[in-house]
Amino acid sequence: MSKQKDKKKQKQKSKHSPELTLKGRLEVTRSGMGYVIVEGGDVLVRPGDFATALNGDTVRVKVVKENIRTGKKEGRILEVVTRKQTEFVGHLQLSTNHAFFVPDTDKPMPDLFIPLISINGAKHKDRVVARLVKWEKTDKKPVGEIVKILLPEDANDAAMQELLAQAGFPLTFPEDVEEAAARLPEILDSAEIAKRRDCREILTFTIDPADAKDFDDAISIRPLGKDMYEIGVHIADVSYYVTPDTDLDAEAYKRATSVYLPDRVNPMLPEKISNELCSLRPHEDKFTFSAIFQMNTKGEVKQYWLGKTVIHSDHRYAYEDVQEIIETKKGVHQDEILLLNDISQRLRKKRFSKGAINFSSQEVRFKLDEKGKPIGIVVKESKESHQLIEELMLLANRTVAENVSKILINKKPIPFPYRIHDRPDEEKLRPFITFAKKYGHAFDISTPEKIAASFNQMLADAHGKPEQHVLEQLGIRTMAKAVYTTENIGHYGLAFEYYCHFTSPIRRYPDVLVHRVLESIIEGKPIIDKKMEEKCKQSSERERAAMECERAGNKYKQVEYLQSYLGETFEAVISGVSSFGFWAETVLHKCEGLVSIISLSDYDDFRHIESDYSLVGRRSGRSFRIGDKVMIKVVAANLEKRQLDYEWVIDVKKEGEEKPKKVRAAKR
């Protein structure tokens, strides 16, 4: 055998060696089997080989068996690298000599042993939040402590906390983190003020939701003469207070983002920082990191400056206040608001002309009673007051990214958390194009720029028409997900070559990283962070977890709200179709539920036409296509599963029947 063949055989042998150790995320199925998700194929782990790992943990797994033909691997977990979840919702089982916490979860996990000194007043069968505090390999059971008792009347609070815990977001801050925040000085240091650009005499204000407490950003404006203005985008200087290699920084990195649920914010940073020290509250001096632009009224930037500042906010606006000024041309600082709005609209128009995609956004907001129960749903749309802030933030984010991209160390780019967005996936795009064509919308896919232009033309032509919402929703689904990475490929959706997140460091960890890198460049001592890509991946993963948690929170509230409307009929739009039924979203409240194929079987035998996003009756030819308007009846609202079940109600006029046909309720 030649040396070359021998080496090749050895390489293949080592590749399939059972001694291989891999790092990945453990996913536990309901049956109790586990899979460690790794590149190149998942590793099966049997229940007895989990060691101390739980569902969602990042682990190291040793491959102990591998089928060379199929590539399927089996392994056992050696250690937990990081835990996804350390707090759990469940029940306490208390006896005279010991206590155990039994988690509420459909994923198998052991009960926690709770020392009697750690039950914190909880009683037998109480619903509680428990924290995992210790689990050594030698321990028979993991050891925990009770951190909160959930009262029966606080069912909503328990549900929201359970969502956060399941997503791996801590419900409380550790004592050392709270203490570190409490020790931070409340009075601004005079020596630090002297090092900064002083903007306290310039008109400055914030624009935020009416119920916001963490004000990340402020805007300043002053005339420079000859159609020129200085417009400042001032961002809370979180990195001044949260420094690397501290307890505060470690906790912020672990969470990576704040989570916004219908009735609460689960913050990335302790309240002392997020709502007090760093929040740009009116009539208070604050440390900020700023992007200050010299611009004309056409929105053309002639010059910019990036650096540390101190500001004093003169006024706090809610979005509604600013919208009223824009519409009535009257209000506090009306001239400045109207000028900024005009400039922002010009920036917006220019951005779309360069290929940014103009997807409109709708948000659902809940009116809640004192117990957090929804008593109303409001659909919010992006208005000019929102766009005013959005465009100035986009300008600051883009400018910072462009500035940093020019810095090379040893002819290499400095490690930096860019916010990137890839072009649409062609496989996802083609069926969408076919669907859009049925509504008369043509697509040119010859270049990424032509695709963006086609999207914008379609959105403009569909505006105000019945198919607008569904085309937007399906169009968004064809898009790649935006992520953080050091490998910049630009932001397709915004049509920016360079982009980052600089403007929300109170609620996003990547913004803190951006501030640190930018400050190091300004000081002439650029940071070379070799772990930046790892930090980007952590931030992207936590962002996805937060979005899923927020969607689950909204869904819970929608189900809770429609519990009061069982048996009632509403107009809805079909929002999704599958082989087992179609989803419909009520027009009035944007609540989505499933109309099961079983509930339609009395009317016809329906088959799924995937390419047409529709269900079609074999006998009648009656179709249910995504985007169609239908009448539905609310027949079930399952809070535990966060599911709504609807029935299709036959429209007598449309179907030409004498009376609605009785339809069976969907079986679960």
Image: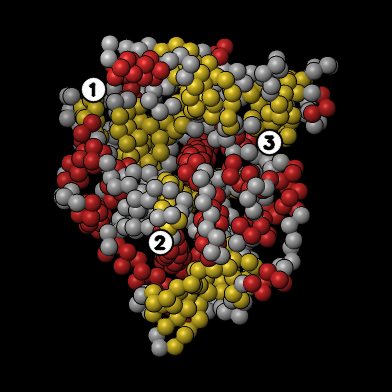
Left or right placement of residue 118 versus residue 623 in this view: right
> Which residue is painted at 27% across and 59% down in the image?
355
Q: Amino acid at mark 1?
A: Asp
Front-most of 282 and 139?
139
> Which residue is painted at 39% across and 77% down in the image?
302
Q: Which mark is residue 605?
A: 1
> Which residue, as the protein is rendered here, is positioned at the far bottom?
226
Marks 1/3: CA–CA distance: 45 Å
Q: Which mark is residue 406?
A: 2
Front-most of 47 and 324?
47
Query: Percent from the top left, x then y, of residue 389?
Result: 46, 65
Front-most of 383 and 569?
383
Q: Residues within 10 Å of mark 1 (few under 14, many from 20)?
A: some
Provide the residue designation for mark 3.
Answer: 153
Q: Earlier in the sequence, mark 1 or mark 3?
A: 3
Q: What kind of element bears circle 1?
A: loop
> Which residue is painted at 52% across and 79% down in the image?
333
Q: Residues within 10 Å of mark 3 (few under 14, many from 20)?
A: few
